[in-house]
Image (tube, grey):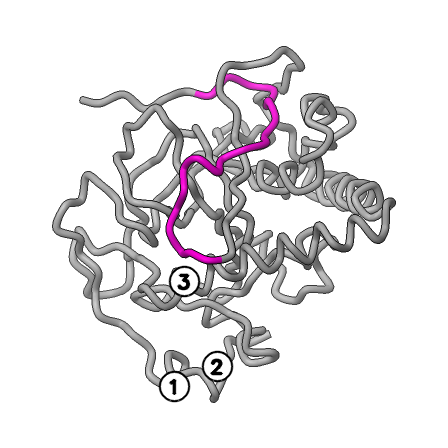
Amino acid sequence: MQPAADSRCARCRTPHHSQYCPLDPDRFASGDIWGISEATRVPIQLILYRNRPAAARNSREAGLSSKWSVAPKNTGSGKYWEYNARPCIMMSAGDPYSSNGHPICLLATFHGAAVLQDLPEVLRRFCVPISPHPLSAQDGVHLHITPEWLKADAWVIAWLYVTYSPLQGRWQNKAPGSSWNSSYKLDDEAFAKLLDLCRERRKQWEELCTQDKELRKRCVVEYKAMNARIKREAGLVKTRKEKDEPVKLSPTSIYLPKDTNTMPTHLVIGGFRLGYQWKEKQKG
C-alpha cells in the first residue's frame, strides 16, 4: 500500500517540514519524540494483564518471545538478536535521567504491517496510524508528527503508561538537509488528540471487556499464536532470557481524567513486574 493523505485534514493538505531543534536538548517537552530501549510487548501486556499482574510475570503464559515483542538488532552471529531503540512520544515534560519513570506512548512498525487486518485484535483496537500511513485517508483517525514522519508504516499504540526503561536520546531527523540537532515532536493539537485517543480507546476496551468476559483471553491466544508464527518464519533466537523473579521497577498504566489534558502524576496506578532487570541511564 502507498502513503495516503486525507483531503479533510489541514496537515495532510499542507504538510509541515520545518525542522524542530529544541533549545534545551538535554530535557524533553510533552510531545517530544525520543528513542527508548523498550519492547512493544510492554504496553500490550499492560492492556491484556491489567487485572492479572501475576500472569504477566510468567513468560510462558504471556508468550513473550516474539519478533513482534522486541526491536531486533543483529549481534553479528546471524541468529541472535537483542533490544534496540525504538521511538516513543514523551507524554510529559521532564529530565531523561529521572528515576521516577517517564510517561510515554510507544511507536512501532510491526515489520511493515500497514493494514489493521494484519494486526492481532488487541493492536487493532489501540494502534493509530502516523501520517503518511496508507490508512490516513480511510476514516480520518491518524496523527501527524512535526516535521512529517519519513516512513509510511508507523503506528502509535494509544496506551499511556510510565516506563523505567533507559532513554536513548532524541529521535534524530535524518531527512536530507536536516541539521545535526533536528528532531521530532507532536504539536499541541496532535498531542491533545493523542490524549483523547488514549482515553477513548481505553474506555471502549474496558466496556468491551465488561460485556465480553472472554475478550482478553481470546486476544492473548491470538497474540501468542501470531508471535509463534512470526518467530518460526523469522528463525530468530532471543538472547535475553526472561526470568520469573520480581524486580524493583515496573511499568505502570496511567488513567486520564475526562476533564483535563494535563498529566496528573497522582493518577498513576496498576502495572506488573517484568522478567528482567531495568537499567537506569546514569548522568555523565
User: Is residue 75 or residue 33 the one in the foreground?
Assistant: 33
Q: Residue 192 carries which label?
A: 3
Q: Give x and y (percent) for residue 20.
A: 21, 60
Of pointers 3 and 2, the one earlier in the residue sequence = 2
User: Is residue 15 or residue 201 the one in the foreground?
Assistant: 201
- Residue at 79 percent across and 44 percent down: it is 216
Tell me whether circle 2 and circle 1 mark residues in contact (CB < 8 Å). yes
Of pointers 1 and 3, the one earlier in the residue sequence = 1
Segment colored magenta: 259-278
- Residue at 32 percent across and 64 percent down: it is 188
Q: Mark 2 points at which residue?
A: 5
Q: Mark 1 points at which residue?
A: 13
Q: Taking 184 as reference, is 62 above or below it?
A: above
Would residue 197 be found to the left or right of residue 229 on screen? left
Give the Cα separation between the discs numbered 2 and 1. Answer: 7 Å
Tell me whether circle 3 and circle 2 mark residues in contact (CB < 8 Å). no
The kind of residue tagged 2 is Ala
Q: Taking 236 as reference, is 281 above or below it?
A: above
Label 1: element kind: helix
Label 3: element kind: helix
